Image (cartoon, helix red, strand yellow):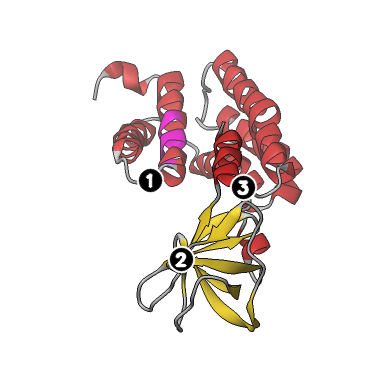
Amino acid sequence: MPAFLLDPTIAYLTLIVGLWLAITAIYVPGTFLPEIGAALTLGVALFALAALPTSWISLMLLAVGMVTFILLPFISPARAHWADAALVVQGIGSVFLFQGTMPNPFVIGALLAGAYAYHHFLLLPIMRQMRDTPAVSDGYDDLLYAEGRIMSAVEPPATGAAQINGEMWTVRSDTSLQPGDAVRVVEKQGLALQVERLKSKQAPIPEAYRLTDDGEIEPTANGTEQSAQRRQ
């Protein structure tokens, strides 16, 4: 093993980098780059630690403190403030990692300060924003049990079209439906809606539409202009 790797500060840095890569691999699985980097870096760090007067109890404190510091805000956001205590544990493990010597104190301080800044000024604000941001709805809750009318015939298993909540939707049904039939949405199936006929068979034709001689419903000229204006 190269002599420079047996320097306590270099061995300490290698260990910290390996732990960060291992934790990154947990959050970004599948690329294999963090996994390979963590395995190589931790392997080198362990060889160096084995050749140095390492306090294995301090090593456990460092590892537990670091992992807890990073994972606690994700596991239990309500207890995220306890992560600072884990950072203190990591600092204690870092200082007493080697018997009779220690890594460069400025390096230890810089890593702890960077971790503290990451936690308080990046991680926690992002988590608060994610928590306070309302979930995005696909609008399905507004469509469920909404009523509309068939605009083109539905002959199972083929689909048809219906106007529901003022919008045109592709619809399916277990029974045949004809233009003008009043329907209710009972389920969403991919990009189509499953509908059922209402007891009141006929519903009034929506404004800007008309019933053709073939029994289909199509927009009038005025309705076409309104649709073009809405798209603009």
Label 3 vs 2, first from the N-terminus: 3
Label 2 vs 1, first from the N-terminus: 1
Residue 230, by quadrant, is top right
**Span shown in magenta:** 17-22
Label 3 vs 1, first from the N-terminus: 1
* Res. 221 visible in picture: yes
Residue of label 1: 29
Amino acid type for the residue under numbered disc 3: Phe
Residue of label 3: 74
Residue 141, by quadrant, is bottom right
User: Cβ–Cβ below 8 Å for labels 3 and 1?
Assistant: no
Amino acid type for the residue under numbered disc 2: Asp
User: Magenta stretch: residue 21 in it?
Assistant: yes
User: Cβ–Cβ below 8 Å for labels 2 and 1?
Assistant: no
Residue lying at 59% horizontally and 17% vertically, measured from the top left: 110
Measure how far apart labels 3 and 1 are at the Cα level.
16 Å
Give residue 10's position: percent from left, percent from top.
41, 20
Give residue 184's position: percent from left, percent from top.
62, 74
Q: In the rendered image, which quarter contains the N terminus?
A: top left
Residue lying at 33% horizontally and 32% vertically, measured from the top left: 41
Q: Secondary structure at mark 2?
A: loop
Classify residue 53 as left or right of residue 68.
Answer: left
* Res. 61 visible in picture: no
Q: Secondary structure at mark 1?
A: loop
Kindly report the secondary structure that dominates the magenta region of the rendered protein: helix
Residue of label 2: 213
Amino acid type for the residue under numbered disc 1: Pro
Q: Which of pointers 3 and 2 indicates the residue nearer the eye?
A: 2
User: Magenta stretch: residue 207 in it?
Assistant: no
- Residue extending farthest top: 106
Q: Which of pointers 2 and 1 indicates the residue nearer the eye?
A: 2
